[in-house]
Image (cartoon, grey):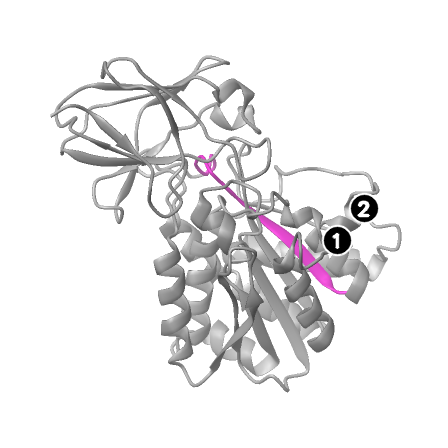
Amino acid sequence: MSIKISQQFDAGAIEVLRADDPAAIDLNIRKDSHADITQWFYFRVQGAQSTPLSLRFLNAGSAAYPDGWKDYQAVASYDRDNWFRVPTTYDGKVMTINHTPEYDSVYYAYFEPYSWERHLSLLDNAQLSPLVKLVDLGSTIDGRDLNMLVIGDPEAEQKVWVIARQHPGETMAEWFVEGMVEALLDPANPFGRQCLKEAVFYVVPNMNPDGSVRGNLRTNAAGANLNREWLNPTMERSPEVFLVKNKMLEVGCDLCLDIHGDEGLPYVFVAGSESLPNFTPDQAEAQQYFIDNFLIASPDFQDEHGYGETPYTDETLTMGSPHITHAFGCLSLTLEMPFKDNANDPDPETGWNGARSAELGKAILQPVLQSLVAQQ
């Protein structure tokens, strides 16, 4: 059986240049829809059981985040449920995966995928709880549903928003939400129980359905980076932000978490809104209080490595978290998880993965609760 490489499935993305020699398979990472962004890949290889493969990504050096390839190991799976890291090198121009598959069919990806089917199952399973209302906010450019989970009493005084996957290739974000929702709905979880006594949660597990299914890293179907659309979103270019922002303005927001993944930094960290000109000492104190409590809640979280101080620019208010802090005067944080591994607690077999993201989602309820109580 000759080697076959395919990508025609949910989130599949690759360009095959040549695959006639298993020791020199040449590939290109495909661009996002209507954008000059390359980073996400996900493809299937058949017919290579027990055959040493050398998969060479020739355009890796011109990717959106070339630093993301340094000390990076790609993920692979035979069943799309169990993902593991495979030997990956980068010479500054070409990234190479060297792997000998144990079975005839193997999948390779930038990070553990989170499928559209699993997304629908997350929504369906959650709505079975009497605590949950599944809300349709509208449709995307490709006609997919943009759904939100309302968890708890909508009449609650405090409103918590959690949005994920503005950048669709950052699949760890939806794994995070899955874990958080599970904890919120677990009657045996004390933090979930207490959180719902303090607030109602508005959760958008996937802000970018089209980009997710298309296999994009950062953009929607129109080529828009949703995390640069918050100042003036439109139904034509960024309906996802337009619809979520309008709902947020309708119901209010007292705390917001925008969940992401970072290509380069091998750490879990948050980015705040301290660059805003009107950022007050009270807001700074609330932000630090959350960070301090998160450090206690999860050993995977740290505050030594991150983006550092970033100056205020014309672009600042186009981004979700600072825009929300500016609009509502509330605590709003961007949470980043690694595509690589957690350098403070590495796992060579899996790296940072979906399971660890989900556990972080559960752990974050502790600092959320403490912040809710503090700002009563």
Q: The magenta stretch spans which residues?
A: 329-344
The label shown at residue 322 is 1
Reading the image, the residue beneath label 2 is 275
- In the figure, 127 relative to 123: above or below? below
Q: Nearer the viewer, residue 167 or 296?
A: 167
In the rendering, at what x and y percent does residue 286 appear?
A: 73, 61
Residue type at tag 2: Ser
CB atoms of marks 2 and 1 within 8 Å: yes
| Label 2 – label 1 distance at C-alpha | 8 Å
Q: Secondary structure at mark 1?
A: helix
x, y (%) of residue 276? 83, 50
Q: Mark 1 belongs to which amino acid?
A: Pro
Q: Residue 293: which quarter of the image?
A: bottom right
In the displayed structure, 277 sits above or below 87; it is below
In front: mark 2 or mark 1?
Answer: 1
Residue 162 visible at all: yes
SS type, badge 2? loop
